[in-house]
Amino acid sequence: MLEGSFLSHLVELRTRIIRALGGLMLGFIPCAFYARELYTLLAQPLLEKLPQGGQMIATDVATPFFVPMKVAMMMAFVITLPHTLYQIWAFVAPGLYSHEKRLALPLVFGSSFLFFCGMAFAYFAALPLVFEFITYFAPEGVAVMTDIGKYLSFVLSMFMAFGVTFEVPIFVIVLVRTGIITIEKLKEIRPYVIVGAFVIAAIFTPPDVISQFMLAVPLCLLYELGILIATFMTKERDKGTQSDPSTHLKKDSPEQKDTPTKTD
């Protein structure tokens, strides 16, 4: 009985993985067709700040092909992320309690939205200022020409740093809702969070003050936003408990889980 259930879960997992990869490949095909244009768009923050006559270079033989393909794959992943998240949700949802479903689904899509916001903030706000700062301090007679592969690695690291930073409200809400930490404790450790934000910014951004501030300040503000949202959610939960205590004192039992169903 258990072996059959385990095998059915493996089959379901395989199906979800195949569908997620299939969606990724379908999204990659049109992105690959416009790979050069996508890389030009990605490189625009640097190209706009290069001095007259400056350009980007490729130092390896295959770099002009593989780097745009990597950009196309990254764009395909971003475009098909809702479909990928749906496949993950369809696999894990039958094993969740009803109250876990109500919390998990908004957090999944909320975290995706905030991650995209972080990437957008890095592209439109942080990268132009960083490149302007770097090119301004280039010594006289030095031609600023960046390798396209190294540029891609740098931009991806910035996207990841800002994307994860914008996830701070989600982390705060999860910590409070799971009871790991209280709102009062979060407010108490605020000075340490501010110091930690600048330390993290110094590690994951270039060695310039502008990019460090542009990562540390949003991190602190998003931490405060997470506290406000968690406080509001806690008050709403307490109001619901006071209005109908029986609905919150009674916990779901394993028998009350939704029966596993396949979701296309």
Image (cartoon, rainbow, N blue to C red):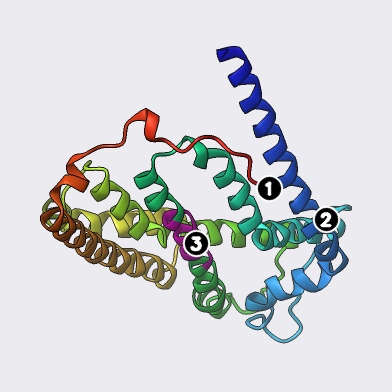
Task: Tell me residue 107's x, y (percent).
Answer: 42, 55
Q: Residues within 10 Å of mark 3 (few under 14, many from 20)?
A: many
- Residue tagged by mark 2? 63
Whole-number angstrom distance, CA of label 1 to CA of label 2: 39 Å
Please report whichever mark, 1 or 2, sits nearer to the chain's N-terminal start: 2
- Residue tagged by mark 3? 115
Residue numbers of the magenta segment: 106-116
Q: Residue at x 29, y 54 (%)?
A: 172
Q: Amino acid at mark 3?
A: Phe
User: Is residue 261 rendered to the left or right of residue 29?
Assistant: left
Q: Is residue 206 visible?
A: no
Disc on res. 15: none
**Mark nearer the viewer, 1 or 3:** 1
Whole-number angstrom distance, CA of label 2 to CA of label 3: 28 Å
179 to 37, vertically: above or below = above
Q: Is residue 155 visible?
A: yes
Task: Tell me residue 50's x, y (percent).
Answer: 67, 80
Which element carries disc 2, helix, strand or loop?
helix
User: Is residue 171 rendered to the left or right of residue 80?
Assistant: left
Disc on res. 264: 1
Please say whether residue 8 is one of the residues in the magenta stretch: no
In the foreground, 263 or 59: 263
Which quarter shows the N terminus? top right
Residue 124, picture quadrant: bottom right
Q: Residues within 10 Å of mark 2 (few under 14, many from 20)?
A: some
Q: Residues within 10 Å of mark 1 (few under 14, many from 20)?
A: few
Q: Amino acid at mark 1?
A: Asp
Q: Amino acid at mark 2?
A: Thr
